[in-house]
Image (spheres, coloured by chain):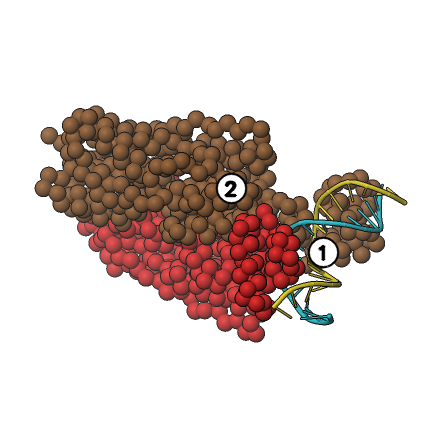
Chain colours: A red, B brown, C cyan, D yellow
DNA sequence: CTGAAAGCGCTAACAA
DNA sequence: TTGTTAGCGCTTTCAG
């Protein structure tokens, strides 16, 4: 835990010089620079990033806030965020509310106290109020995949969630399904976009005169399973189920197998997100994929433009959606 | 972005007093304390944690380093670490090498530069060399679930990986299997404990005169699937497969279905970790569960004892293992 | 009950 | 090519 003073003393020079040497700034003779580097090495010098951040008034750090990091959907996003941010020479703090929505406020607050330079917030990763406070405190924020009844509290990059539902509905309709179930995340704070997924889905079906049976879940496989059980217990159980995320769809698959139905011959199932696991269920899960890499890249681009006070930040177009047609959906049984 | 000076000026007092008021230290009159708090509020004061850390020489932060955060196994561990650490009043930095083992060195280095007070390192989250350097730099480290040929570079809490393999072998033996396949993570740096899982497994079987067919994977479902394909292509394909983690086991399930075999009637499959998904595969995956909450709690306890220079830190006993007997394993076909 | 002073480890002009 | 000086925002004795 040597400081630049320690090494300055040792080489008989001043701290400023050492600092310059260490950072490749100023013009020092190759000789002294070399000497300094070597001594630093010998003394096991480690820069103190805390001191540096204070002096520079830049933490070189951004944060990503999500609801729950053990959810692989967010895990995948966290991983790509970290990589892309590193490309910008910046560290990423990964934080989550642990599904405890109100805690998002404290979380965001703490991030501004830590003086992160920007925050990417996903729905459920912080309340609009907390976000507005953060922005007032001078921290840049961009909302990723948000959707709100009111205005979204910061520049936002995302997808068309209504379209997600519509795509799903059309797919099932094309396959001839008429009795259709829907599993959606309960319309709680921070999950408004699930509502839109459900809405797009229902609307398309209603136009065809189909009334969907709705059950609520909580974005986990467990809850999806429970919801599916409820659907299967109906007097006229659905021949197709759409869950507003893959985890719940996977739970639904489990319920269906347990009840002895076969997928997709008797019941079709589809989800949304295309998490890694979706390719490995039995049968492989039909789902809708958003281009998350694109979304992360764009939100980071926007965030950095904001941070560097670009005159005009242009928000990217909505991310594309792809139907990943796999084996869990098939023609409606006759 | 007001500082304590700004608010000191406003209330006509000195920064020290404001600091005390804000932190509930010293003895101020209730009146001024109240006044200060109020003004702070009005000015939208946010403490600067960077400055505080520098002054206190304590970052109040620890880190958890894992190979890949999008892997739900690590996601679950990260989530519980964060919760438990918060109980100690400390923030957790979640970092991963992104499967790029050599990067672990730079990662750990950066953490010491950030002056985290301690690091929990999981296998693949950092090299022994990097860990030793960190310790020399004064950062406490505890290794979680490690296993090495050489000495583990820091106090360690974990489980008996040989026993994992043995348990799996016994389970399959009891079910009458004799042609048995094994999918193990390639014996690369940072994955030595997979080797032990495999070894425990093979040893038990060898004692019974059974030679296992081994295929290597890379801890992903995709790689597990590929490995299983290889196993199934054997002249005498196995009637049971053990994969050294659940993700690979899930990949194996997918391969087996694709090839048209049925589980468990024709082929049994089991894994290790008991990730959330293991309960939702079809059929539900038999696996072995380590008590990760216990392990995380203990490693954090040890870490904090180290940080606070407890005279004698006692390492906890190895974590318990539980066979989670589910539907993916059954009697060997006759 | 409040203030003065020093310092945490580093950076950033500006001089010399 | 190197040194001086000031300061980042906060904490922490120790006085008053």
**Looking at the image, can residue B91 be seen?**
no
Tell me the quadrant of the picture where the N terminus of chain B can be found.
Answer: bottom right
Residue A299 screen position, x and y as percent:
47, 63
Labelled disc at residue B113 = none
Q: On screen, B116 above or below A131?
A: above
Inter-mark Cα distance, 1 to 2: 35 Å
For the view shown, which residue lies furthest in the bottom direction? Answer: A311
Residue located 37% across and 65% down the image = A320
Closer to the camera, B250 or B124? B124
Disc 1: which residue: B3
Closer to the camera, B51 or A289? B51
Determine the secondary structure under disc 2: helix
Residue located 51% across and 41% down the image = B135
Taking A266 as reference, is A155 left or right?
right
**Circle 1: is it few (<14), some (14-19), or many (20+) Cα within 10 Å?**
some
**Looking at the image, can residue B54 be seen?**
yes
Determine the secondary structure under disc 1: loop
Tell me the quadrant of the picture where the C terminus of chain B can be found.
Answer: top left
Residue B299 screen position, x and y as percent:
48, 34
Residue located 26% across and 46% down the image = B217
Disc 2: which residue: B135
């Amino acid at each position: 835990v040597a400081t630049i003073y320690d090494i300055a003393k040792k080489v008989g020079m001043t701290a400023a010089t050492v600092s310059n040497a260490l950072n490749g700034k100023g013009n020092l003779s190759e000789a002294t620079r070399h000497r300094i580097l070597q001594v630093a090495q010998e003394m096991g010098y480690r820069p103190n990033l805390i001191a540096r951040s204070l002096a520079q008034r830049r933490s070189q750090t951004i944060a990503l806030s999500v609801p729950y990091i053990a959810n692989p959907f967010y895990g995948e996003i966290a991983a790509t965020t970290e990589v892309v941010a590193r490309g910008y020479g910046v560290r990423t703090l990964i934080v989550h509310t642990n599904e405890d929505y109100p805690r998002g406020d404290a979380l965001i607050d703490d991030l501004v106290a830590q003086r992160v330079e920007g925050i990417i917030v996903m729905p459920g990763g912080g309340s609009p109020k907390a976000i507005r406070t953060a922005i007032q405190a001078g921290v840049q924020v961009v909302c990723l995949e948000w959707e709100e009844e009111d205005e979204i509290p910061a520049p936002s990059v995302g997808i068309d969630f209504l379209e997600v539902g519509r795509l799903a509905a059309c797919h099932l309709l094309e396959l001839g399904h008429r009795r259709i179930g829907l599993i959606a995340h309960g319309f709680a704070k921070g999950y408004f976009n699930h509502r839109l997924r459900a809405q797009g889905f229902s609307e398309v079906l209603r136009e065809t005169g189909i009334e969907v049976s709705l059950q609520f879940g909580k974005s986990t496989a467990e809850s999806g399973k429970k919801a599916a059980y409820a659907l299967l217990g109906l007097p006229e159980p659905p021949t197709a189920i759409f869950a507003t995320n893959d985890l719940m769809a996977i739970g639904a698959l489990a319920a269906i197998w347990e009840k002895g139905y076969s997928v997709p011959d008797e019941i079709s199932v589809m989800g949304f997100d295309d998490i890694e696991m979706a390719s490995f269920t039995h049968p492989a899960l039909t789902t809708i994929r958003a281009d998350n890499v694109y979304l992360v890249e764009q939100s980071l681009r926007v965030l950095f433009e904001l941070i560097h006070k670009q005159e005009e930040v242009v928000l990217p177009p909505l991310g594309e959606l792809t139907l990943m047609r796999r084996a869990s959906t098939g023609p409606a049984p006759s």
